[in-house]
Image (tube, helix red, strand yellow):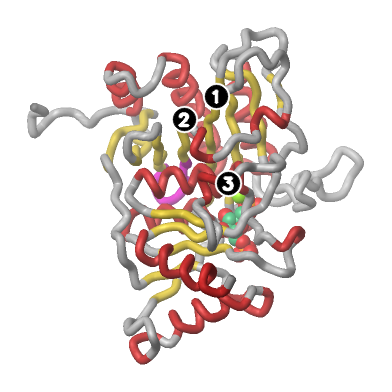
């Protein structure tokens, strides 16, 4: 039994206890500690804001704005966060390779260091359009096992379904910095104690309420959506006079990490649907760096995640930077949105 005045459980202690329960091995524990340490460094850089000289767009070596593999302008903090994560994870001996939303191909661990058994994927700074306006941003990560005897890992070794993730998490850089983590045994939240420099467990076994009256979507894209999506949102907006029989509220932060954090905390449904204007028409978000880790965190908290038709975690990826429509959050509402799509097909 834990005494009432017991000191809070640190991330380190939580992970050691999970190792004793047989839920993770020492290598994965170390990997997660290193990822958390990198997030602390990113938190410091984000927190300095204009004083750190890190706001604004990154410059390309040849001049002009630097553009990533997705064709998006890179912010200085996107580039810095990517470097922090790569550097922190290079030498620990637990990783075989990293893949990032900001890099065209995966990066195997340099030959100078021992190569481990895991693959790490990350979106180093999600919600980067919010950096310059001092609104919450975050880091999202996902951990897979490296297949045996692959020699030097390459992109194809990362193409595993979300169900194969052995851990997933995000760190939100908001009024407080929080790490939300799952190793497949519930979703737990840790708050950074800035004085101690330690993540402390502040919410064990987060639970997404099954029902909600709150949805998150970028309504400005409405004209680009397909028919079932139009019908679903029309019925949400009709409120208690419509077929849903209740009034809905809307929130959109444009940082997936912040929107999902709200939903993990008090329920809701997050939607970035299929969209005619985006390349590939699959919406904006990426399966490997955003949808899969968030889907695992939400499912582990009793919520659900689909692409409008099928469970996100069951999708067999075809490429590293694949995009996917995303519906995730409160279970009953995700089921409702999914029903509109399936009935239309
Ligand atoms: P990013 O990874 O380049 O920051 O893009 C992903 C972000 C998500 O955090 C957020 O949900 C979405 O893009 C917002 O998109 P939009 O600007 O279309 O509203
Ligand atoms: Mg992102």
The reply to whether callout 3 and callout 2 are in contact (CB within 8 Å) is: no
Q: How crowded is mark 1: few (under 14 residues within 10 Å), some or many (20 or more)?
A: many
Q: Nearer the viewer, mark 1 or mark 3?
A: 3
The residue identified by callout 1 is 145
Q: Residues within 10 Å of mark 2 (few under 14, many from 20)?
A: some
The label shown at residue 201 is none
Of the image marks 2 and 1, the number of the one nearer the N terminus: 1
The label shown at residue 315 is 3
Residue 179, magenta (yes or no): no
Real-space Cα separation, disc 3 to disc 2, in angstroms: 16 Å
Percent position of residue 324, x then y:
62, 54
The picture quadrant where one finds residue 14 is top left
For disc 1, does the CB lie below 8 Å from ligand 2? Answer: no
Q: Give the range drawn in magenta.
A: 170-177
Percent position of residue 219, x then y:
57, 75
Quadrant that contains the C terminus: bottom right
Of the image marks 3 and 2, the number of the one nearer the N terminus: 2
Residue at x-position 61% and y-position 30%: 84
Real-space Cα separation, disc 2 to disc 1, in angstroms: 7 Å
The reply to whether callout 2 and callout 1 are in contact (CB within 8 Å) is: yes
Along the line of sight, the residue nearer the viewer: 131 or 326: 326
The residue identified by callout 2 is 166
Along the line of sight, the residue nearer the viewer: 337 or 238: 337
Q: In this view, does 100 lie to the left or right of 214?
A: right
């Amino acid at each position: 039994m834990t005494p009432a005045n017991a000191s809070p459980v640190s991330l380190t202690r939580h992970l050691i206890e999970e190792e004793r329960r047989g839920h993770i091995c020492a290598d994965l524990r170390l990997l997660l500690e290193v990822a958390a340490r990198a997030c602390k460094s990113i938190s410091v850089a984000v927190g300095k804001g204009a004083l750190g000289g890190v706001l604004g767009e990154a410059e390309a070596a040849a001049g002009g704005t630097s553009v990533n593999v997705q064709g998006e302008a890179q912010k200085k903090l996107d580039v810095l966060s990517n470097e922090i994560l790569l550097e922190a994870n290079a030498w620990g001996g637990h990783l075989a390779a990293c893949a990032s939303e900001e890099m065209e191909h995966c990066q195997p661990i340099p030959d100078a260091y021992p190569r481990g058994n895991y693959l790490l994927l990350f979106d180093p700074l999600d919600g980067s359009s919010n950096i310059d306006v001092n609104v919450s941003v975050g880091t999202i990560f996902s951990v897979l096992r490296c297949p045996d005897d692959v020699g030097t890992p390459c992109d194809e070794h990362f193409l595993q379904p979300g169900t194969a993730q052995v851990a997933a998490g995000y760190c939100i850089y908001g009024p407080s910095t929080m790490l939300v983590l799952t190793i497949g045994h519930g979703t737990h939240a840790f708050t950074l104690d800035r004085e101690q420099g330690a993540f402390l467990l502040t919410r064990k076994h987060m639970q997404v309420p099954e029902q909600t009256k709150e949805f998150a979507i970028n309504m400005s894209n409405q004209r680009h959506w397909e028919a079932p999506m139009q019908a679903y949102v029309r019925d949400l907006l009709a409120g208690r006079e419509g077929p849903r029989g209740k009034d809905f509220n809307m929130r959109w932060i444009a940082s997936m990490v912040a929107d999902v954090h709200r939903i993990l905390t008090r329920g809701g449904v997050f939607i970035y649907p299929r969209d005619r204007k985006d390349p590939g028409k699959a919406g904006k978000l990426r399966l490997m760096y955003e949808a899969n880790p968030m889907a695992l965190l939400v499912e582990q908290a009793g919520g659900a995640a689909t692409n409008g038709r099928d469970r996100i975690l069951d999708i067999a990826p075809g490429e590293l930077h694949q995009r996917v429509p995303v519906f995730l959050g409160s279970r009953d509402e995700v089921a409702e949105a999914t029903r509109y799509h399936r009935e239309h097909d």
